[in-house]
Structure formats: C-alpha cells, structure tokens
Amino acid sequence: MSVRSGVPVTRGNQLNVAVVGAGYVGLVTSACLAELGHRVICLEIDRDRLNELQSGRLPIYEPSLEDLVLGNVESGRLSFAGDYAEALAHAAFAFICVPTPPLDNGHADTRHVITAARGAVEHGAIGLTVVIKSTVPVGTGDHIAHLAVYRARADVCVVSNPEFLRQGTAVRDFFQPDRIVIGTKDHEAGRGVAELYSGVSAPVVETSRRSAEMAKYASNALLATRISFMNEIAALCDATGANVDEVARIVGMDERIGPHFLRAGLGWGGSCFPKDVLALASMAALHGRRAPILDAVMATNDGQREVALQRILDAVAGIDDPRVTLLGLAFKPDTDDLRGSPAIDIIGRLSTHGIDVRAHDPVTIPNAARLLPGIGYRTDAYEAVEGADVVLLATEWDEYLHLDWRRIRAAMRGDTVIDGRNVLNEAHLRRLGFRYVAFGRGGQDWHELVEMDEHRTTSQRGRRPGRNAANRVPVADSAA
Ligand code: UDX
C-alpha cells in the first residue's frame, strides 16, 4: 500500500503498458497506472511536448498530477518516448489516449485514434491488447479490430475502456471511479485489463465494445442535459420569483435524481461536453435518427451565454466607454483549460460591441493571452475590477468566494455584479450597494417584490422588519 497525494493505492502485479498520447487523459492514465505499480512508457509524438516532459515539466495544470508524474519517473516506473517502436517494445497493453476533436459536420474526428491504433498494432508484441480510452463513435473499436486482422494481427485484442476523468479532480477520479467499464466480448482480454486496475476499488462492468463506447457519450450527454434543464428552470425562476438554488437542492434530495450537476449559471463548457454532445447528435443523424433532446440541450447552453451578454449590455447601456471585468476564464475551477469556456465566448461577443474588457484568472492568463490578445489581463483580481462598470464572475474559483467585496465596490465605477455561477452571497452584496444579478435566484424585480411583501408581513406581526425571504433557507454554496 502506498499513499501519494492523499490517494491510497495497493500495488498489484507489475505489467508493461504503453500509453499513446501525453495529453490530459494520457498523462493522468500514465501516472496513475505507474502509481498502481505498472511499468509505463508514455508515447508523445509532439517533440516540444516530449522535451518538456522529459525535463520534468508538465504541459497542463492538474492538481496533484505533477507530484505523481515526477515521483513515478524517479522510481523508474514511468518514462516518456517519442516513437512507437520504443514505447511498444515490451508492452502487453497499449492505451490509446489521443484526442477526437469535432469535424466541421460535428462528427468526432477519429483519425488520431486510427493512426495511434495502427502504430500500436504495427509495433506491438504478440498478444497485445489495445485499450481505447479516447471517446470514440460507436463501432470504432470494432473497426480497429478489423484493421488488426487485415494487417495479419488476429492475435491483437481491442478493448473499450472509456475514461470518466473530470479536469481538476482527475487523479482522484482515476483512483476512486464510480465504475470501471471493460468493453469486449473476449473475456480473457477483459480480465487482463481489469487486472491492471486491481489496486482500485470499484465495480467492474463487462459489456460489449459498442455499449462501452455509447455509455461514455450517454454519460456526458446526460450530465449536460441536467445542467441545461436546470438553466431552463432558472429562467423560469427569474420569471416567477422562485430561487433555483433552493429548487435544485429540493429536487436533488430525491434519491432517484441525486444532487449533482444541477447548478445553474453560465452553462457547461470544457473539452468534453461540447464535443461529445455534438458528436452524439451527429451520430444520430448519421444513423438517420433524430435527437431533439440533444439539440435542445446545446441550444439552451448557447442561450446562457447570450443571456449573460444581454445582461451586461443592459447594465452598460448609456455609459460612455464602458468597461467590463471578467473574474475567471477557465471553463471551470482548478484547471487552466479554456476549451469551450463560456468566459472566452462571452469576451468574444463583448468585443464585437466595442466594450473594453479586463479579465483575471488565477492560473490561465498565459493561455488566454495567446488565444485572445488585446484584452486587459490582470494577475490581481482587485486591480482587474478597477474602474469596471460591470463585473461578471464567470468561473467559481475558490479565491473569488473570499474576495473583499467592500474593496471591490470602492474600486469599481459602476455597481453591477453578475454572478455567472450563483455562488456569491447575494444579501451581503446587496447590503454593500451592489446591483446583484444571478441566474435563477429570483431576478431583481421579484427580489424587490418579495422584500416588500416580507417587510409588510413582519411589520404587521410586530417583528423586526427587513428580513429577506430569500435568505431564510441558507444556500449551501453561498459565500461572502
Ligand atoms: C467531463 C465529465 O464529467 C467527465 O466524466 C469526462 O470524462 C470529461 O468531461 P470535465 O469536462 O472535466 O469532465 O468537467 P465537469 O466537471 O464535468 O464540468 C463540465 C462543465 O459543466 C463545466 O463547464 C462546469 O462548469 C459545468 N457545470 C457542472 C455546470 O454548469 N453545472 C453543474 O452543476 C456542474
């Protein structure tokens, strides 16, 4: 038993593993398999990235991953290589962890996966098991299996083993997964892959390659659906005076529903949800099926960004040379990833309206500056809000939950705070004189009506007036 980064691990038999791709999934998979005791060679064909890794630098930010990579490199269980022959020479397993970006028509581009699988088949030893971690359209595993047979490698087994790693908690997700999915009808090959995870305690689900591939898409699409659904409810809450945080809490207490992925706000982004929901909808079209739910889920998500833009435009209407500050650029906290980030999208939309934008993010400013030059980036949140007419909280970094809003109020020119993640303490901000705007927390007009109503009721009862109905039930994730 070893413990690193708070992750308890029991080491089993040492097996030789090649991991193709040192991107986000490949690096996490390599480091975690090495931590489980296996001898792992991670193959990266991008020379710059490989050099970086070989000199001990990580190209991505992921909590506790650096320790895990460096520790396993030091122990000799993890190394990096630049070609298939070296990485595959002794490998019993080849994990395919390369990206499947969207094509213009929305389909997942599987070219990298096919190239990687071909490389593995060509250089792998007899009895190699190709394990597909990349998210691929249903049937890709079967296609690769045919490809191996075509190349006279009928000894190669292909297993679908989708990843469910969330950025920011990927290492924990690897060691404490809800399930390990093994997609193959070759029981022997499936047992071999399951054995690689023998230090991890989780239910192992054996299924067909196709069901495993579909399960990955269905999981991400359902999570995105929950969020879009709650965003639709949030809009109704704004229209009717209900509070979506409280609604989500009540709804989530139903065991059949559960509390996760019900947070309303700017909507979902990232490297997976947007491409996977789109790829699933495209897969449906390819098979002559309609996918109206998926279409609506994407449209609602896009609509959240437009709502945020409109709220900003309303707040700066009539102001000369308006300035807007975004707090947070990453698509979610604890990652430096900007892919699919609502913040980046909103900045793009603001720029077309000629609005001066400033932005702060605790880790991802260098990436953002490359992607969107011309924005006033600040490494200090208080500096970023100076002279702002509107502040939009776009990513719920922990740092933002502990800001001194009195100081921010004094630094801003205007008074509007748009809480894009429903995480700020509304009552506190209102007391400080902010015009607080959120997603489904009742809306400005309703807030005032509820307050007046409350005032009337409490005065009649002779109790201390001024308590705000919205604050009676504390919202778990509010922060000052
Ligand atoms: C996702 C899946 O969760 C993971 O299993 C898969 O393997 C990769 O894709 P990730 O993209 O890292 O992981 O982020 P996740 O934590 O799932 O969040 C996705 C997006 O949804 C983020 O933009 C987040 O801000 C948003 N979100 C999440 C909400 O808007 N509301 C919620 O309640 C939860």
Image (cartoon, helix red, strand yellow):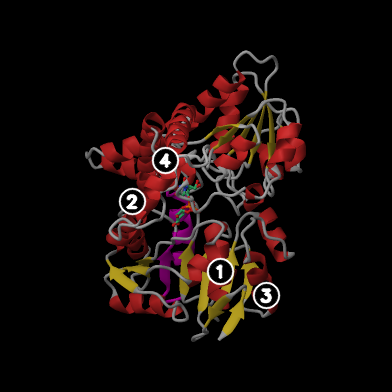
Is disc 4 surrounded by few (<14), some (14 to 19) or many (20+) residues within 10 Å?
many
Kindly tell me whether mark 1's CB lies below 8 Å from ligand 1. Answer: no
Question: Where is residue 150 shown, x and y percent of the image?
Answer: 34, 61
415 with respect to 19 (left or right): right
- Which comes before the other along the chain, label 4 or label 3? 3
The answer to the question of whether label 4 and label 3 lie on touching residues, with beta carbons closer than 8 A, is no
Q: Which mark is residue 30?
A: 1
Quadrant of the image containing the N terminus: bottom right
The answer to the question of whether label 1 and label 2 lie on touching residues, with beta carbons closer than 8 A, is no
Q: CA distance from mark 1 to mark 2?
A: 39 Å
- Which comes before the other along the chain, label 2 or label 3? 3
Q: Which residues are magenta?
A: 110-133
244 with respect to 384 (left or right): left
Is disc 3 surrounded by few (<14), some (14 to 19) or many (20+) residues within 10 Å?
some
Q: Which residue is mark 3?
A: 71
The residue at 42%/49% (across/down) is: 110
Q: Which mark is residue 243?
A: 4
- Helix or strand or loop: what does disc 4 sit on? loop
Question: Where is residue 233 shown, x and y percent of the image?
Answer: 36, 38
Up-down relation of residue 355 to residue 358 (above or below): above
Q: Amino acid at mark 1?
A: Ser
Callout in the foreground (1, 3): 3
Foreground pick, 92 / 231:
231
Q: Which residue is mark 2?
A: 251
Q: CA distance from mark 1 to mark 4?
A: 44 Å
- Rendering quarter of residue 186: bottom left
Please tell me whether residue 112 belongs to the stretch shown in magenta: yes
